Amino acid sequence: MSNDIILNKLERIFFECNKHIQRLNSAATKMSFFMPLTSQKYINLTDDEVGNIDQFLFRFAKLQDAIGQKLFKVILLFLKELNYTMIIKHNYSKDKQ
């Protein structure tokens, strides 16, 4: 797999992760109005507040999935490709000397 393809995949994955982070931050800001959560606050949560908690948990899980199932794999591919390219360039430059 070429570096260009790998870099394109990395860019798409970073974009996806960034979207999850933006949504997490938005939910966290909204949750800050009723956090820390006590038992009394929990009983009196509105549907919107429960929705903010749901959004936070959902986006957190999606971010973890994107990082674990996609980002790490592509970074390893990129590093392998980068190391392979560096070895070839290094050996090529040694051959020229």
Image (cartoon, rainbow, N blue to C red):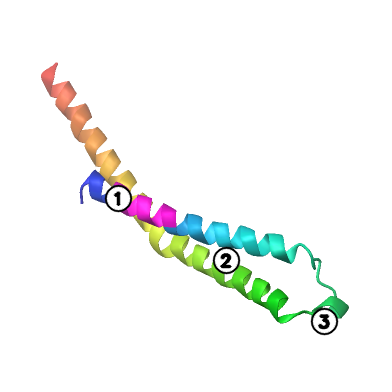
Q: Return the residue nearer the eye: 40 or 80.
A: 40
Q: Which mark is residue 8?
A: 1
Q: Position of residue 66 (x, y in %)?
A: 45, 63
Q: Residue at x 79, y 64 (%)?
A: 33
**9 in magenta:** yes
Secondary structure under badge 3? Answer: loop
Q: In the rendered structure, which disc, 3 or 1, sits on the residue that comes first in sequence? A: 1
- Give the foreground label among 2 and 3: 3
Q: Which residue in the rendered view is the most extreme toward the left?
A: 96
Q: In the rendered structure, which disc, 1 or 2, sits on the residue that comes first in sequence? A: 1
The quarter in which the C terminus is drawn is: top left
Q: Which mark is residue 96?
A: none
Q: CA distance from mark 2 to mark 3?
A: 24 Å
Q: CA distance from mark 1 to mark 2?
A: 24 Å
- Give the foreground label among 3 and 1: 3
The residue indicated by pointer 2 is: 60
Q: Return the residue nearer the eye: 91 or 6.
A: 6
Residue type, label 3: Asn
Residue 83, quarter of the rendered image:
top left
Q: Position of residue 68 (x, y in %)?
A: 45, 62
- Left or right of 66? Residue 94 is left
The residue indicated by pointer 3 is: 44
Q: Residue at x 81, y 71 (%)?
A: 37
Q: State the extent of the magenta-drawn residues as a range.
A: 7-15
Residue 90, quarter of the rendered image:
top left
Q: Residue at x 71, y 64 (%)?
A: 30
Residue type, label 1: Asn
Secondary structure under badge 2? Answer: helix
Q: In the rendered structure, which disc, 2 or 3, sits on the residue that comes first in sequence? A: 3
